[in-house]
Amino acid sequence: MNKRVLTIVGIVAVGLLILYGFRGNSTGSAAAGEKNIAWADPGIAKEAVASGGKPVFLFVETDWCTFCKKMKAETFADADVQKQLNDRFVNIRINPEKNGVVRFTGEELTFAGLAEKLRVTGYPATFFFAADGQLLGGQPGYIDPSTFADLTAYIGGGYYTKYKFPEFQSLPKDQRM
């Protein structure tokens, strides 16, 4: 009887390990979208902006943030979002809870210092800057792939100089790109 119980416990344990392994793999693939985005080193962001003349996308995240993970798994996995970010932006991400330095807005700041300067109070936080470093706008929280693709087209295409965002969104898609 004891041998039978031990066998059952062993089978259950192996089953749980297999399930846990699959769960771990799916978590890893959920963040695959962010790996398809060309992230610039925050320490040389100023030089990257100056040489590329592109606007800047700044993603402020933490390791524990559920909606940061959701944004990376869903929004950054979207092919249109990836294309917009890679073609039209210098992409930077920082975690204010980790050590690091950003050289971008005319000064050198720690990750936490930049988050404080931008008044980040929750995660994720998304910011867009013109190529000259001027803050164009920021948005706290999760942004779905469709809205984010619209934002990147709006800013990356320079439409922010002609339209308010809701007006831009009402344009037919073929007039936006």
Image: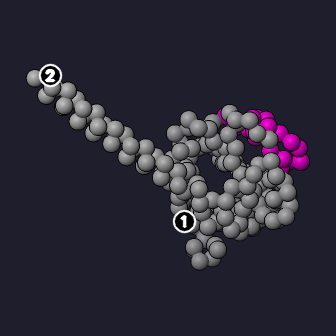
Q: Position of residue 49 (x, y in %)?
A: 82, 59
Location of the N terminus by quadrant is top left
In this rendering, does residue 134 appear at all?
Answer: no
What residue is shown at x 59% (from left), y 77% (from top)?
174
Name the residue tied to disc 1: 79
Q: Nearer the viewer, residue 153 or 73?
A: 73
- Earlier along the polypeptide chain: callout 2 or callout 1? 2
Q: Position of residue 69 (x, y in %)?
A: 53, 45
Classify 165 as above or below 98. below
Helix, strand or loop at disc 1?
A: helix
What residue is shown at x 59% (from left), y 56% (from top)?
35
Location of the C terminus by quadrant is bottom right
- Kindly indicate the quadrant of the structure image that contains residue 124: top right
Classify 150 as above or below 20. below
Helix, strand or loop at disc 2?
A: helix
Q: Nearer the viewer, residue 115 or 138?
A: 115
What residue is shown at x 85% (from left), y 57% (from top)?
47
Q: Which residues are magenta?
A: 102-121
Image side of residue 62 versus residue 146, left or right: right
Classify 164 as above or below 137. below
Q: Nearer the viewer, residue 50 or 161?
A: 50
Classify 8 as above or below 149. above
What residue is shown at x 64% (from left), y 72% (from top)?
176
- Name the amino acid type tagged 1: Ala
Question: For the residue carrying disc 1, how many other residues have a C-alpha within 10 Å: few (<14), some (14-19), or many (20+)?
Answer: some
Is 118 part of what is drawn in magenta? Answer: yes
How much space separates mark 2 and mark 1, taking CA atoms? 55 Å
Name the residue tied to disc 2: 2
